[in-house]
Image: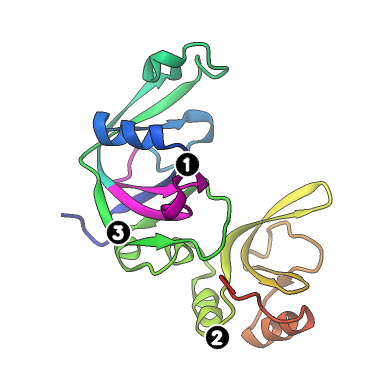
């Protein structure tokens, strides 16, 4: 049905009622002001479930084919919420086909905030966990660290005093987080590793008491 290089967009499914609309009405909305670049040209849309979905929370259990899109106001999408503060805002309405079960679902090994993830169909099909989906220059180091048992997180938000950073890789440890930057020009929190090698990461993780194993 899909080809290896087809673009897949993973978006957040915040509420069960939004999931019901996707199932029964065949659409998903993305606010234009927060939309990723591929919002209107993805072939597949995956759904990341929030904590409100109980047993399936923090995972991607469903996806659908994207069949088209249009630009609409929120009030026209959700007419029973015309008094909503964002009623006049512009949204992309993605028209989707029947929902397809992703078996098994793609889990997030730790709770983490996700907005949108852009990936490809071959990665979406093969992913064992959510970090396997990301397409960045950190692929090689990510695989090495994962195989070494460090359970790295990708595109991870770190707050340092009054500023928030997105780092390429992060390893939550017992005494803090080891942040790793692959992009030499990117801003980074204090103490972040640049030009990281597996040995440098291993030493930094040891100084912070060792990695925190998800679910332990």
- Magenta segment: does it hold 42? yes
On the rendered structure, is 73 left or right of 25?
A: right
On the image, numbered disc 1 is attached to which residue? 36
Name the side, left or right, on which 94 lies relative to 112: left
Residue furthest toward the top?
Answer: 83
- Kindly identify the residue that appears in the image at 43 percent across and 56 percent down: 59
Q: Earlier in the sequence, mark 3 or mark 1?
A: 1
Specify start and end residues of the magenta stretch as a single range.
40-63
User: How packed is label 2: few (under 14 Cα within 10 Å), some, or many (20 or more)?
Assistant: few
Asked whether, in this view, residue 160 is left or right of residue 97, the answer is right
N-term mark: 2 or 3 = 3
Judging from the image, what secondary structure is the residue with disc 3 in?
A: helix
* Residue bearing mark 2: 148
- Please state the horizontal and vertical placement of residue 81, each as a whole percent of the image: 46, 16
Provide the residue designation for mark 3.
121
List x then y, in percent, for residue 192.
75, 68
């Amino acid at each position: 049905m899909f080809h290896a290089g087809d673009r897949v967009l993973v978006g957040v499914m915040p509420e069960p009622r939004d999931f019901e609309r996707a199932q029964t009405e065949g659409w998903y909305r993305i606010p234009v002001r927060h939309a990723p670049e591929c919002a209107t040209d993805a072939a597949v849309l995956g759904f990341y479930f929030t904590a409100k979905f109980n047993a399936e929370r923090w995972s991607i259990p469903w996806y659908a084919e994207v069949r088209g899109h249009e630009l609409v106001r929120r009030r026209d999408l959700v007419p029973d919420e015309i008094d909503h503060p964002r009623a006049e805002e512009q949204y992309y309405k993605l028209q989707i086909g029947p929902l397809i079960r992703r078996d098994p679902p793609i889990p997030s090994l730790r709770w983490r905030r996700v907005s949108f993830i852009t990936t490809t169909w071959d990665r979406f099909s093969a992913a064992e966990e959510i970090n396997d989906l990301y397409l960045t220059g950190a692929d090689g180091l990510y695989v090495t660290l994962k195989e070494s048992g460090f359970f790295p997180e990708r595109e991870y938000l770190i707050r340092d005093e009054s500023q928030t950073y997105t780092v390429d890789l992060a390893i939550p440890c017992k005494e803090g987080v080891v942040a790793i930057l692959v992009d030499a020009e990117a801003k980074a929190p204090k103490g972040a590793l640049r030009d990281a090698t597996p040995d440098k990461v291993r030493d930094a993780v040891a100084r912070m008491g060792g990695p925190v194993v998800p679910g332990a």
